Image (cartoon, rainbow, N blue to C red):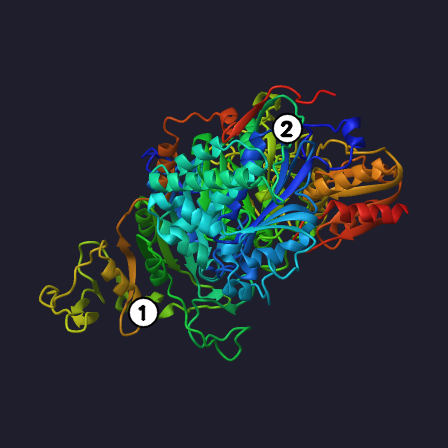
Amino acid sequence: MATAVHEVTPTEASAHPQAESIVVRFAGDSGDGMQLTGGQFTLSTALAGNDLSTFPDFPAEIRAPLGTLFGVSAFQINFGSTSIETAGDALDVLVAMNPAALKTNVNELKAGGLIIADTGEFTERNLAKAKYESNPIDDGSLAKWQVLAFDISALTVAAVKPFGLGNKEALRCKNMWTLGLALWMFDRDRQPLVDWLKAKFAKAPALAEANIAALNAGHAYGETAEISGPLKQHHVPAAPAEPGLYRTVTGAEAISMGLVAGAQLANIPMFFGGYPITPASAILHHLSRLKEFGITTFQAEDEIAAIASAIGASYAGQLGVTSSSGPGIALKGEAMGLAIMTELPLVIINSQRGGPSTGLPTKTEQSDLYQAVYGRNGDAPMPVIAARSPSDAFEVAIEAVRIATQYMTPVMVLTDGYIANAAEPWKVPEVSDYAPFPVHYLDTVPEGGFQAYARDEKLARPWVKPGTPGLLHRIGGIEKQQGTGNIDYGPANHQAMTDIRKAKVDGINIPDQAIELGDPGGKLVVVGWGSTFGPIHQAVRRARRKGLDVSHIHLRHIWPMPGNLGALLKGYEKILVPEMNTGQLKTVLRDQYLVDAKPLNKVSGQPFRIAEIEAAIEGILA
Amino acid sequence: MNDMTPAVVKSTPKDWETDQEVRWCPGCGDYAILKAVQRTMPEIGARPENTVFVSGIGCSSRFPYYMETYGFHTIHGRAPAVATGVKLANPELDVWIITGDGDALSIGGNHTMHLLRRNLNCQVLLFNNEIYGLTKGQYSPTSRVGTRSPSTPFGSVDRPAQPCAFALGSGARFVARGIDVHKNLPSVFKAAYAHQGAAFVEIFQNCIVYNDDVFASFTEKANASGNQLWVEHGQPLLFAGGTKGLTMDIDRLVLKVVDVVDGDWQGAHVAVHDQTNRGLAHMLVEMPFGPFPMALGVLYDDPAPTFDSAVIAQNKHASEGKKPDLQKLLSQGQTWQVEKEPRPE
């Protein structure tokens, strides 16, 4: 996992890398319930004490036509008894619920890996839809893998027969049958699943019983089929972890809870203006249920209204928050400038996805760094911070609220589709461990008179709530006069105000950059940001085990950058910047520090593999 | 308006003026509207610190700088969205939105529609001058077909939007019309403020530089009486000094103009204005000017529950009996306890 829950011991480090981890992918039609199966398998994995990382990979279409290649929905999980930081490079086990799922995923299975396939779906029609000329299960084309093919559909229908379900409904229990088999394979307790099914189908007990029967039947199949064939039971021991209470968390959940925590630490109510967009909507959904925390959520008519209403709420004294993905963030650009000009606190969450335009709505990318740092008219400096993992999103959200309220500025948080949807175990933090940063509204005329654009030592202006007697003032997007905030187009004033806005953001107090792994100085440093943390960290760790002189630096603060970063980077002979874009952080680093940062880019909509980064490191140090 | 404001607060129009130099062109209709608003504020008992003017972009949107209240001059078309955030964050504030025909119906048409359908408790003053003034005179979404402007040198060809019809179509529960220099304007503002919910007021505003006298056919002294119909709830729809009125053509279900002889409007079957009659409001705002007079005053006023009160009520209801326990929130879902490192080194 990407948190500091577990530090790898020297014994572990010397062991064969990832020997105690297994990568499983469930793949089927988008209507087959693969995300749900994966989610429940993740929970049982977490409850077994394994460390884990997941990668839900689903099509943009809600219900793509049955059996098609583009309609395949997959859920990948990497779990083990050591620290897990990625969803895994190559699969050990592929569960393929139909020919299309097999075809689109099998090439990511390791040689010798296990395919579990439902022959009930390998009909002529489905084979044709998947563009198979012959049945791969029989034609020898899967020879380099182990194949366990049997009629899961028929076995499921038989298992649920006593509950009187129609054929269609009976077949819907296939995913539970498969999950039962998977639970057997990895020696997992079924009880939490049984409890969950009973709660989920509380209003339809027959459905609950049918699903439980399917789950049990899959499990029983594993037990009885063990005697022969490739199906073997594995026991993956629990991963070492700090004592404490744990749960699984997705990035969207962590961000939402981090915003709630931030608002509590700032001691102000929160207003969230959002507009539905993949993959950011989950944050709106989570926050909409938390009214008791003083949160108002507003589903606006469009992206612009979402941010504009949040700015209005901030003006009225609440913490304005808005959230979107790349295309929506583009629409919000002008309003961000207004928040910069009027110097109001605002948190903007960008769950990045593949672009440009509509791009790849459900696939991940990190290509909005330029948009975040530079994407506004005028000289419009704005802090940008990035989450590296689902659990890190909690800390980053709090940090965003701190900066926004302490410095009276909009702040953008960069996360991505991968972080938003992926789950990992999370040691539940103690709220009391976080230092509060309460907001102080100005509510009386200060000595020497009130000025709307007076500055404190941080260069922040006072926050005055409308409704406060004696402090009436007007703000807006037109250039402000220093101090008074009145309209002023004067040349010297615009120069001064532009300089102040820049100095305020440049002067934000952020921690010095730490080195994640390795030494301060050396032959090579790999610099990353955001969700590439896992693969970079593992690749650097592996390379170091081989004796290579390489270190890992991972940025949370994209803008402004940590004060020591330039000096730190100059201590290395070479700099490699892996990014899921065409080299955006690389360009910023070159610009800021005149260093020869080299890019390593991937924009396939899939996260980096450890091996890809490892190969690049070896290539440079060869 | 906000129903929690104390009824009587003593102020004079002068108290609502700022020290800022007003930067509209000499002779602009905006001056008269500013005066009318400043005259209205003492009469409605508004408190400056509790009042927020939110505007978009355009000549009219400079308005907040000239009101001694809280003010937010936002970005083009987005004032309704900003105002929604302000009002939801603090429903006790009196929120006034100042906008123009381009701001409210072109770039911000979407927000205007949604503000009205949601029924946010606020006043929307739309200064309609049928032109883009601040960008030097291009035709606007309310310009009549054939309007010659720098961007339409051969005359505009697209049909104009009708602000009040748009407002009704969007679900507005209060629709009124006024004229920048007319003495009735403060009374229209007072009615708008008294209405609980989104109150939409179209003000015919003369742009002396780019569209002078565009409303002269009914605002000029000589044309006023024959072409202005000031409606009043419970009163007959009369104009031209009581010599003409509107009646219902029962066969065609449309309004028609009838002559009233010797003040006998009953005899002429002149309709009585009912401001809660939505169907009548639609007909009044859609009457073609020329064959019909310009309907002015409070054309429609029929309150409905407001968006802000519904949001507050739901927030309250959903929070009832729940403690905002962050530690509990973080610990939700399926959790497990790790007692100690399972594999000591």
Could you say which is closer to the camera, residue A437 or residue B148? A437
Q: Which residue is mark 1?
A: B222
Q: Is residue B49 above or below residue A146?
A: above
Local crowd size for mark 1, using a 10 Å CA cut-off: few (<14), some (14–19), many (≥20): few
Q: Quadrant of the N terminus of chain A?
A: top right
Local crowd size for mark 2, using a 10 Å CA cut-off: few (<14), some (14–19), many (≥20): many
Q: Which circle marks residue A238 in the picture?
A: 2
Could one spot residue A341 in this view of the protein?
no
Could one spot residue B122 in this view of the protein?
yes
Whole-percent x and y of residue A131?
58, 66
Give the residue furthest to the left. B267
Q: Which circle marks residue A265 in the picture?
A: none
Distance from the alpha carbon under mark 1 to that under mark 2: 92 Å
Q: Is residue A291 above or below residue B338?
A: below
Q: Is residue B68 left or right of residue A131?
A: left
Q: Is residue A287 above or below residue B175?
A: above
